[in-house]
Amino acid sequence: MLLNKGKKMVTKTLTIILVVIAFATLAGCAYNHKQFAAERSPLNGPDEFLVQIDDFGQFWDKAEAERALARVSQLAKTTNVIVVAFVHGWNHDAAPENENLRDFANSITDTKSRLIDSRNAESAVYRASRKNLTGTEDLSVVSIYIGWRGRSLPWIFNYATFWDRKATAERVGEGDIREFLLRLNGLYRNQQLERRTGTSQTFMGLTTFGHSFGGQVLFRAVSTEIENELITRTDANGDPALNSSEVSDLSGFGDLVVLINPAFEALQFERISQLSRKLRFGKQQNPVLLVVSSAGDLPRQILFPIGRQLDAIFLRPNFRPGQRALWTQALGEYEPTRTHLIDLHETSQPLTPGFDPEIYSENPCSIANLDLSNVPSIAGIKLTPNQNHRVNSPFIVAHASTNVVLDHSKVFESTLRKFLNDYVAIAQGKRMLVNRTFLSCK
């Protein structure tokens, strides 16, 4: 009887293993592993780009990536330019009809209207702010949709590809897209330097967004850059280096990296978290990383831990104390790393028309010294620090109410979009003021 029971358990275990292997094999088939036609994409303007990556982390069309870099470089020499790059997540791709691609295209249209179009009353404050900061209200917006094979099986079968697609997202983030983003950041930093030295008055903004497994792609691509900056401010033991008890110039990657409902384990963020906790940041520190996790994100709250627990059973050794929770919970869902709550602020006004752009010339230090990790209200949203928050911290891991982000997939809704538009706009204004050599704020 015991022998029969043992045989049944072995059979059941083998069945589970075979099912997992079968799904992984199916996920690795050629379905959807292709370059989608760019001419049918809703992103078809001169400043709109569709950069596609294969499962090995290589460009499908390197020339498209080069065209994007060349266009940004050209614009940065002559006018104000903002670059917005988005990496989609699981169950999505670069197909012309893909919902994420179409939503991204629509959000860029809305952003251009809010920032540029004089027919839109909301644009007045942004145009006036640019004129005060750069001498001209002119602005070009460059949009870059980064597509990869997040959808590798048709219909509901794609939900069985969790392990395969997560591994692919890690691989993609370490491939050609890392070089592409680093080169974009190089253009950004060069323009920052030219503004600081007075060689140029125009500015370049760079904001990158990653959703779900796209957050994994983006984090893998840019985290080393952020870690290296932190490491240079600590000694061999990881303690603050001499004369570095207060740090006010952590640059990060571009203006801001935004991860929305990121589908990767909190353990990947732990090194950055540990390094930053040992440092103090000054008033003029800008946010570097913003993580937004929805309270209604059931896939990351339930399915992600299940997937990671199964992974732990079959693939991983025993954990040291405290590691299992970090390894099985997604960043933003692991409570010890949460620093803020994001919710609607019913009594507040949006940035427009309540924000006065004259503040940049009349009282620039009020912006240069603004702690953007603790703002009362932006676009009708309140960013409330919790007990884990540190003053002027460049890293914000926020838990958002469903009023702001409904669930895992609703990342292009107007409430969140307006908050991010205004938050990034003020962060960019702060960077421009801080970079002025003649500005002295105590």
Image: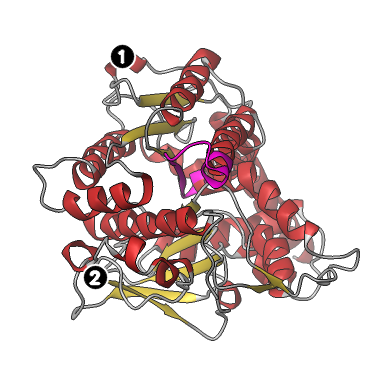
Position in image of residue 97 (x %, y %)? 27, 27
State which quadrant residue 276 falls in: bottom right
Position in image of residue 418 (x %, y %)? 26, 57
Q: Say if mark 1 contacts mark 2, CB within 8 Å.
A: no
Residue of label 1: 39
Mark 2 lies on a secondary structure that is loop
Q: Earlier in the sequence, mark 1 or mark 2?
A: 1
Asked whether 286 falls inside the magenta stretch, the response is: no
Report whether 143 appears left or right of 146: left
The residue that appears at 36% across and 17% down in the rendered structure is 38
Position in image of residue 179 (x %, y %)? 64, 30
Asked whether 210 falls inside the magenta stretch, the response is: yes
Amino acid type, label 1: Glu
104 vs 243: above or below: above
Amino acid type, label 2: Gly
Q: Which residues are magenta?
A: 193-214
Report whether 297 appears left or right of 98: right
The residue that appears at 29% across and 62% down in the rendered structure is 406
Question: Does residue 412 show up?
Answer: yes
Residue of label 2: 380
Mark 1 lies on a secondary structure that is helix
Which one is closest to the eye, mark 1 or mark 2? 2
Please name whichever residue, 251 or 66, is drawn nearer the observer in this view of the structure.
Answer: 251
Report whether 183 appears left or right of 313: left
87 vs 12: above or below: above
109 vs 302: above or below: above
How many residues crowd mark 1 within 10 Å: few (<14), some (14–19), many (20+)?
Answer: few
How many residues crowd mark 2 within 10 Å: few (<14), some (14–19), many (20+)?
Answer: some
The scheme the figure's colours follow is secondary structure
